[in-house]
Image: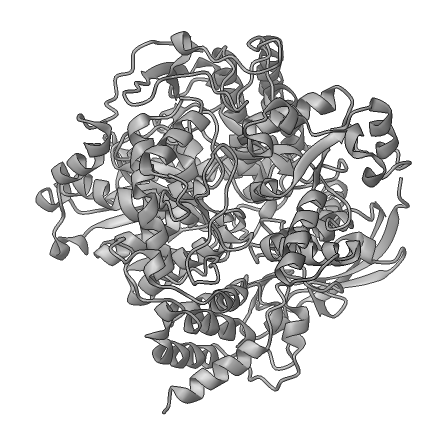
Amino acid sequence: MKKLLNFILKIWRQKNNEEKGKFETYRIGDISPDSSFLEMLDLLNNKILYRRVGEPISFDHDCREGICGMCSLYINGRAHGPESLITTCQLHMRHFHNGETIYIEPWRAKSFPIIKDLVVDRSSFDRIIISGGYISVNTFGKTIDGNLIPIPKEDADKAFDAGTCIGCGACVAACKNRSAMLFVAAKVSQFSLLPQGKIESKKRVLNMVKKMDEEGFGNCTNTMACEIDCPKGISTEYISFMNKEYIQSFI
Amino acid sequence: MIIKNYFKLDSKIPIGPLNHKWINHKSSLKLVSPSNRSNIEIIVVGTGLSGGSISATLAELGYQVKVFCYQDSPRRAHSVAAQGGINAAKNYKGDNDSVYQLFYDTIKGGDYRSREANVYRLAEISSNIIDQCVAQGVPFARDYAGYLENRSFGGTKVSRTFYAKGQTGQQLLLACYSSMSRQIGKGRIKMYNRYEMLELVVIDGITRGIISRNLVSGEIERHAAHAVIIASGGYGNVFFLSTNAMGSNSSAIWKVHKKGGFFANPCFTQIHPTCIPAHANYQSKLTLMSESLRNDGRIWVPKNIEDAISIRNGEKNPEDILEEKRDYYLERRYPSFGNLVPRDVASRAAKERCDKGFGIENNENKEGVFLDFSSSIERYGIEKANELGIKNPSLMEIKKFGEEIIESKYGNLFHMYEKITDQNPYKNPMKIYPAVHYTMGGLWVDYNLMSSIPGCYVIGEANFSDHGANRLGASALMQGLADGYFILPYTIADYISIYIHNKKKLSTKHIEFNKSEKKVKQRILQLISNNGDLSVDYFHRKLGNIMWKYVGMSRDNNGLSKAIKKIQELRNEFWKNIFVPGNIEDGFNSELEKAGRVADFLELGELIAMDALSRKESCGSHFRIENQTKEGESIRDDFHYKHVSIWKYQENKSISEEIMYKENLTFSSVKLQSRSYK
């Protein structure tokens, strides 16, 4: 049996976007090092429920296998916590010390208004995709055979790597400018690298960048914090790629 | 339960030879002209592969579509988590694949409990799906010549699975989502994020809309439509621990069922053989490792029980067990398919070994087997060294090359495994054990995918028709997209065309909307004002334990009868002793969301157990202990059970009084044989 852990949790509580929020302190003990961060919060919520001491803490989560992008949490000053290349649902308590004080906050960005406690509204990301993050092909199935569009393996792999973005918003939360460049660049690059998406690439990059600015996201100043905190390890090279696409679109 | 032998609803399967049914049927369906489509409103519940694809396609056709999902964005639907791939009969590998082969594998894999006509249509459409997705920008794996790559999956002898590393579901879902987004931009789709459907509104026997709850503001809203499409996925979370997302629920289908929608084969639950074993009682979720890993992983447990004990106690490592002391039980029992037997067979074989005490994981039930990649790493390493012209490569070099190749195929899965278990699967074999994954049962639909309530359609995992008693790998993605992109857009027009002549205005003022809204509010009030002692999770876990123990991988008469009683007791206890914090006018309240869903699971769970009890044969993922051969293989009973069990809820009566009807299954192109993978 592994040694169980105790923690002091400082958790951001906020009723809604209008009211002021504050940190509340909670103590939790007997946590298995193999338990996930969200499982620890489940246990804390159960404790709050059974002791009838206020409302349970609201936080977003769904698939709990690191792919849906729904979970968030700014933990000890890092998006998705101290470990690299994972979402919060894949973060385990073995990465924390016994007795440690852990700060848990929501994503901090004007473009992600708070809904409640640790839950934020990321629909600005959806609106960026709506502005052009697609290939305008109809879905009626009257397309050509997939093998009639041969794609070099390297390009397909690169497009795939960009395409793995889960839209969690960690890049924005990690950035001091609250920039959404990595998110937008990933989508722009995925499609521009593929022959199918090339045709509309000019329009796409212009529309998406315009929308990103309208939504109030900041600019990129190349500090690369987004790449470090991105759970899918999406490279800032794609930002350069997008910048190139953007400039070319004016030519 | 009351069992009746005749089924009065027409399944609308077209006449004629199997390979002409869909073509003939399409030519007889009525059409809606483009100018009329913008007057038609359609509601879609769910935004996974089926919900996303139907929403995008209907909007493209020009209909007005309202789409609801409980997540904060349609991109998060649980289809995103599908890993391995999507099947299509393209025969790109030249291994003699064909529409018929795919059809045959799927029918046989489902243990002859699916509808022949539906499955054939699915196989026919499969190739189209790949082409469509390529056009939408899905970065499928490619070979060095630029052509699409394939791999193989359990239950088949050909290589027909298209994939994007271990994230195929994600890539396909994001393609749906971007097509939807394009239509949202055009204003043809109105998206309702963080909404939940809480009631189906039926007026004079016809679907007229839904009642929904805005999960952020808590508001209850009415939405009218000419048709409602349920694409809300499966109900595996009835088992509490499953591979489903935490929010996946049965509420939408259950509301339809209680409004008169027949429920088919509820007990057909797929147990997936390759999940990371449960490790402790606080666990909230199980994580799947893609079936594609079985292409390169060999499954084994020690031959000697003493070795298994030593491994569990940490005294021995897997590599300490010599090759001849390992029992590669799938290769031993099923030499022709080996590690690639279908999921139900692989799951039962793992259970059999663990029940006999050979499990290798040090958890509560000592359950777990090894999935070992060392042979493949070595083989690939040698091949690569040969390719590079390295003579006499060292063991280190071979391992390095081999690991690189394994990484390129399954990198993200290995990464995920390491993060969860803190063990490096390149060095040590993975530990896996079966877990609840996919539900093959669901709402009954006819060939047009319409439920027994006119105007209410059901697609994807939420319906029942295509997988029979066991789903083969990489066919769920195929079904979701086939239903949404290529089947329902045609068949729904046939129904909707009546509204062009009969210009009845949509209204939410009808008394049925009042009644439904009142019912929803009353139930929320009942949950919130009940000042009990126990949390929602307590009941959910308890239900899950009953389900897994008695209605899980193998079932018997006594256990099932016991389960039904226990679930009834638990449900009574729930309504007496549940505690949900908050007030009815409050908005965001995840305890309340969960409470409503668990209340539905507590009813559905009983129906699942009833269905399992009534099916006294072993079939697919459903294994009745009473019906097995001496070697522990299942015995199907085609004489008594070649049917779909269809359950009808009787209004204001208990679940135990549901009536079961039978839709007989007919097979014209396949001969029913006992499923052998030896």
* Looking at the image, residue B598 lies above or below residue B113: below
Q: Is residue B619 visible?
A: yes
> In the displayed image of the protein, which residue is found farthest to the left?
B501
Q: Position of residue B32 (x, y in %)?
A: 14, 48
Q: Is residue B541 above or below residue A99?
A: above
Q: Is residue B386 above or below residue B360?
A: below
Q: Residue at x 55, y 82 (%)?
A: A218
- Counting from the top left corner in percent of width and height, residue A40 is at 75, 49
Q: Quadrant of the N terminus of chain A?
A: top right
Residue B91 lies in quadrant: top left
Where does the C terminus of chain A fall, quadrant-wise?
Answer: bottom left
Q: Going 48% across and 57% down the picture, which residue do you hit?
A: B141
Side of A22 where B633 appears, left or right: left
Taking depth in this image into account, of A228 and A122 the one nearest to the observer is A228
Q: Report x, y in % for residue B499.
A: 14, 43
The answer to which image quadrant residue B307 occupies is: top right
Instruction: Determine which quarter of the picture holds residue B374.
Output: top right
Q: Position of residue A159 (x, y in %)?
A: 49, 67
